[in-house]
Amino acid sequence: MTRRKGLSMRYNNKNMKQSQNPRRSSRKSGPMPLNKRIMEVLRRNRKAPVRLKELAVLAKVQPRERKEFDQLIAQYKAKGIIIQERNAVGLAENMQTVKAKIVSVQERFGFARPLDEEATREDDIFLPGREMLGAMPGDIVMVRLSKDGKGKTEGTVTEILEESHENFPGVLYSENGRFFVMPDKDMKIPIEVWERDRGDAKVGDKVLATVGKRGDGHFSHRAKVVRTFGCADSAANCCEAVLAAYKARLHFDAPTQAEAKKVAEKGIQPSELMDRLDLTGYNIFTIDGADTKDIDDAISLDKVGDVWELGVHIADVSYYVKPGSALDNEAYARGTSIYYADQVLPMLPKELSNGICSLNPDEVRLTFSALLTLNEQGDLIGYRFAKSYIRSRVKGVYSEVNAILDGSANDEILAKYHELLPEIEKMRELSALLHKRRFERGSMNIESSESKFLIENGRVKDILPRTRGESEKFIEEFMLVANQAAASVAMNEGLPFVYRVHEDPPETKIDTLKTILRQVGIDASGLDTEVTAKQMSNILESVRDTHLEPLINRQLLRSMAKAVYSSDNIGHFGLVLDNYAHFTSPIRRYPDLIIHRILSAYVNEQPGKVIEKRFGNYVSPAAKHCSECELNAVNIERDCEDCYKAEYMSNYIGDDFEGVISGVQSYGFYVELPNTVEGLVHISELPFGDYILEEGMELVERMSNVRYKIGQKVLVRCAAVDVSAGEVDFELLKAE
């Protein structure tokens, strides 16, 4: 008994000592919580993901804890704490991962772009095909970054977060009794179509398709034809598919048409002119392309002593398109008119765009006028905005006014513009002054390669580079001044507004530009400090009228950020302006319509608080929406015009052309012809050798040191075209 008691006392004493250390006592009291066991295992395995089965074993997951284990893994994934790669997981902090969007899928590889507003093509992540989990363009994925054998960054798709269900255009073809759709651009992998899912599409048809069933990899996906457009060799058919793929709004619904018809039938009543500035007695006229029907701007000019009085008179679309109306809702959804080849998808029905809102000659029209005062040096020293009405003297045409200015106008043209000849001469003088002032402050005289399509019976007959004469340039100068004045009113009065902004060029793009400039022997040292538009303008002017001008012009364009709409005024880099907005085209751009409404409230003397209440929370999302609509329109216009260019070149397969290398890639180089058509010389068509891409602008054969670089003149032969994809293939005949 005594021995047992002694043992009992020692046991109790030991327990008393332990009870004085609560932490030690709690550890002995039971197993570690499951969440802590999971995290401890993952922290120990920093270098590689842990298979889920192995994680369950290492974390000592009991059968009764299995449901909790699965729930914790799902929670950690949702919160971004862990990353799952197939059937393995790891801590996100230990795995270099990014959230990205799949932008391109080829047969053996693809690219993903990080979900960052500033991410561009240069930031795209290379994905080996075996590491993509069958991800499709538009999918949102998690990508784990790593280095390949040469030290270059590549990615592995660890998880598809959101599947894209967007339709895509392509061509239906058949092979060994099976049907496939070959997508046009973002995906270059054929997708099989089961017989029951091809509808009435025939081999060679342009179609719109969707992925009806996803497999484990790209080649196990199955597509379904959604719509058929006819033969894929027709650019017109291909453009219909492009419009459908981008969900372009082709028709106006019944309520919108009814409102437009009502507005047109009402016309302009005398009572609507009472509170407006009467400008019908002034020499006001329009200048546009010969085929333009939606005429939204007119100009007037006078000089009083040393002061210029410039009038920019814009169609008062906001008077007819009321907020919340069917017309307004449809215009907002479209965001902009879309122009491609010889076609237009207008933002507003023709009853407005070509009718009551169009500033047609000899017809009274309601306008919103920017009355601008400039001094003898061309500085904007005063401005006033007023609701007005005008009667345009004549529908001016660029080519006719240019003929007047260069002295080649015939008697018929001179008679048409007889009473306006003094104004035209004044406009030439003021335009030259404004142009000079603009470039003195550093604005760049960059020309873009725009195309003019001559189309007959639905097929393109010729393509010409679109040139700008003197009258196009002075209309541009006058619109710039009006847009600057509109933004200045907003800034000075503290109005909520939609500005047109242009950020400074991204540093990565400037680095690429400097490399190219040095390669062609241009001093780029000035770009090592803070880059200004003036520096870039000086570089372009240094090669003006030389063989390097097209190259430098193109590279400067590529180096700059894209202009967008914003409620936050950060200025415009390219124009070197602190204040800039779009005021002059409300028929075809919704941001201009927004600005008209805000300035209308201002000129009608609505209190600032009222204007802020109406528009304060509206302008930011509206600006973002309009930027997205503009980008969508640009993509539609580019894709459609590429189809027309390929169709045109189908008439010249086997013919030879002189061109200039416009871009270089690891797989070959692009050549641009004088008519603006661009085609690819694939590396497989070059003399046999080992080619490497040097600094993004030269393709070099290692042994012979033969080089193909941007700006180099070449002789090529048109070898093949793909109208559906808008692609042209060239063979190299000779390089200078």
Image: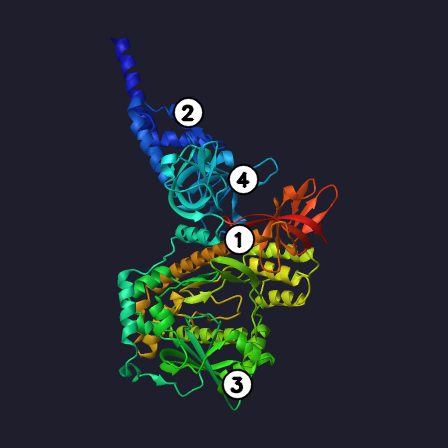
Question: In the rendered view, does 96 fall on the left or right side of 497?
Answer: right
- Local SS, label 3: helix
Give the spatial CA distance, label 4 vs label 3.
64 Å
At x 52%, y 74%, the residue is 398
Q: Determine the residue located farthest toward the front in the rendered image.
A: 457
Q: How far across and down, in percent of the image, does residue 571 sit? A: 48, 67
SS of the residue at dot 4?
Answer: strand
The residue where tag 4 is placed is 154
Front of the two marks 1 and 2: 1
> 14 or 117, which is in the foreground?
117
Residue 597 x %, y %: 34, 72
Q: Could you tell me how far apart the alpha carbons at marks 3 and 2 are, in whole angstroms?
A: 87 Å
| 359 displayed left or right of 665 | left
Query: Whole-percent x and y of residue 185?
Result: 49, 47
Q: Of marks 2 and 4, which one's residue comes earlier in the chain?
A: 2
Marks 4/1: CA–CA distance: 37 Å
- Residue furthest to the right: 704
The residue where tag 3 is placed is: 421
